Image (cartoon, helix red, strand yellow):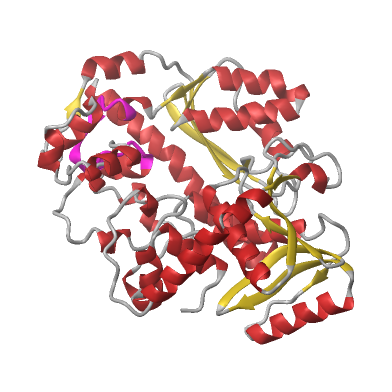
């Protein structure tokens, strides 16, 4: 087997995953990680400038070309920063994100878009040190470069503050015997039959495995992995203790919400706690405003006062009930500009002081509003007034004061809505055009700069209708709660 650093890391996480990659990739499921990959690419490109001018080894489908270009850069420069330097030893390939050559000494820097160091990153860089050392390159330093989550942008990007650099040289060299043994095992595995590996937390960490459904296909259905209210860590712990079926689970110590999910799994009736629902409804007052934001995240903040991975709001929908009449307002920022100021001003204009507002999972909306208040002191008083008068429509469903089997253990609005209104096409996200969820909304907003005027207007309309449905759904859900109180 030819190994790359990504294959090596997948193999030591789970040998079966790597074997399936090579022999039965068709049994895997597609995992949408486009935004993660895009962020990783952006971070990698920005990090190339961390140590000043660099020689970049261009990617090529021809591996030999990359190896030759790397060797040319090394031979021509006694001191240099080389990015994407490529090496191969005994069919073990790696590209080093940043390689610093100082005479006969080499420093290896692995760039990650994460805000913390994970164990798998140490395996990643240790593998690179192994390959370079076997090629008789004298590695004197190995470091992980990762995002500083506390960085705040002021003017031009400050790369020295944006990135943290952790020296892991000792760890990398201490792992060399382990690396050699792992490589030998992984290469031998490629010619053998499918490995028999038990499912474990490695199925979801450090990355979600695309073969989980395949590897659990022999388990009785339904089983503990289909119970949404059961924590993931608990599922694997119980599985290791021999708890697999729902019947097995019934004999375990589980919290009331998990027990309710199990109890109502095959019931056609609704669980309705009228007392609790009435208590919740009494916390609301009119006029009542229903608010939902759409946001995007960037590893590298583009705007002043921006933080890595901060939720940047670019759109909201606002339904409101005033004097018994349902009305609607909305905002969608123009593409290519910082959307925050215009959105914050419009929000203060659209939501009066001291009124009650509703969000579904208000922690998210409140965090966005609080961040806007921190950035714009002149709007802070009004924004925090909205923040402080907000209630959470998710509460009755999180607490299972209203529950039925169609919610499948979830309290997400994407489950609750069709469970409450299974036959209403106006409340079906699948009937929308182009934009059906938050990820698609974010990607659509990013695309707006690339479109013709005609296509842009069509996309804007689709974005507005998607966000509008989020708040209209909240209106209808509240109506349902009022009907049963």
Which residues, given as a range, are shown in magenta?
398-413
Q: What residue is drawn where x is 23% and y is 40%? A: 238
Query: Where does residue 129 sit, x and y in percent of width and height?
Result: 65, 63
Q: Nearer the viewer, residue 229 or 440?
A: 229
Q: Is residue 84 visible?
A: yes
Q: What residue is drawn where x is 43% and y is 75%? A: 187
| Numbered marks: total | 0
Query: Where does residue 67 sit, x and y in percent of width and height?
Result: 70, 81
Which quarter of the figure is the C terminus placed in? top left
Query: Where does residue 183 sit, x and y in percent of width and height?
Result: 48, 69
User: Which image quarter: residue 21?
Assistant: bottom left
In the shown orientation, is residue 267 left or right of residue 29? Answer: left
Q: What residue is drawn where x is 64% and y is 83%? A: 63
In the shown orientation, is residue 286 left or right of residue 457? Answer: left
User: Which image quarter: residue 37?
Assistant: bottom right
Q: What residue is drawn where x is 21% and y is 21%? A: 273
Query: Where does residue 6 sit, x and y in percent of width and height?
Result: 53, 66
Q: Nearer the viewer, residue 139 or 258?
A: 139
Q: Is residue 452 visible?
A: no
**Residue 295 in magenta stretch:** no
Up/down of 345 relative to 430, above or below: above
In the shown orientation, is residue 228 left or right of residue 334? Answer: left
């Amino acid at each position: 087997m030819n190994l790359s650093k990504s294959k090596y890391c997948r193999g030591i996480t789970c040998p079966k995953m790597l074997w399936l990659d090579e022999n039965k990739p068709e049994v895997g499921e597609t995992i949408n990680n486009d935004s993660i990959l895009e962020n990783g690419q952006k971070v990698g490109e920005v990090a190339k400038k961390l140590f000043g001018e660099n020689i970049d080894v261009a990617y090529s489908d021809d591996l030999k070309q990359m190896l030759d270009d790397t060797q040319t850069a090394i031979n021509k420069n006694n001191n240099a920063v080389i990015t994407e330097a490529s090496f191969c030893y005994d069919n073990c390939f790696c590209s080093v994100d940043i390689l610093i050559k100082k005479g006969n000494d080499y420093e290896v820097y692995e760039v990650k878009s994460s805000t913390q160091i994970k164990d798998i990153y140490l395996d990643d860089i240790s593998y690179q040190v192994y390959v370079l050392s076997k090629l008789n390159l004298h590695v004197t330093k190995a470091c992980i470069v990762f995002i500083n989550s506390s960085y705040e942008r002021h003017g031009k990007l400050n790369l020295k503050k944006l990135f943290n650099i952790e020296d892991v040289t000792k760890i990398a060299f201490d792992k060399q015997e382990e690396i050699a043994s792992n490589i030998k095992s992984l290469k031998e595995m490629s010619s053998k039959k499918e490995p028999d590996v038990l499912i474990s937390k490695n199925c979801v960490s450090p990355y979600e495995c695309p073969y989980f459904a395949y590897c659990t296909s022999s388990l009785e259905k339904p089983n503990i992995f289909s119970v949404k209210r059961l924590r993931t860590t608990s599922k694997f712990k119980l599985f290791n203790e021999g708890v697999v079926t729902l019947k097995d689970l019934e004999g375990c110590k589980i919290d009331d919400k998990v027990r309710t999910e199990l109890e109502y799994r095959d019931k056609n009736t609704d669980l309705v706690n009228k007392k609790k629902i009435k208590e919740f409804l009494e916390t609301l007052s009119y006029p009542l405003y229903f608010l939902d934001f759409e946001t995007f995240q960037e590893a590298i903040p583009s705007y002043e006062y921006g933080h890595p991975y901060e939720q940047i709001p670019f759109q909201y929908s606002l339904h409101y009930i005033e004097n018994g009449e349902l009305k609607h307002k909305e905002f969608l920022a123009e593409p290519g500009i910082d959307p925050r100021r215009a959105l914050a001003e419009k929000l203060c204009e659209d939501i009066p002081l001291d009124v009650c507002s509703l969000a579904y999972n208000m922690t998210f909306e409140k965090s966005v509003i609080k961040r806007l208040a921190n950035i714009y002191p002149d709007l802070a008083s009004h924004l925090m007034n909205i923040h402080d008068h907000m209630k959470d429509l998710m509460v009755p469903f999180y607490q299972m004061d209203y529950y039925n089997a169609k919610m499948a253990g979830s309290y997400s609005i994407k489950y609750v809505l069709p469970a409450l209104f299974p036959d209403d096409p106006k409340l079906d996200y699948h009937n929308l055009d182009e934009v059906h969820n938050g990820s698609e909304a974010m990607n659509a907003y990013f695309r707006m700069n690339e479109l013709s005027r005609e296509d842009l207007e069509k996309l804007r309309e689709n974005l507005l209708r998607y966000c509008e449905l989020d708040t209209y759904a909240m209106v209808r859900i509240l109506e349902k709660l009022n009907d049963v109180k």
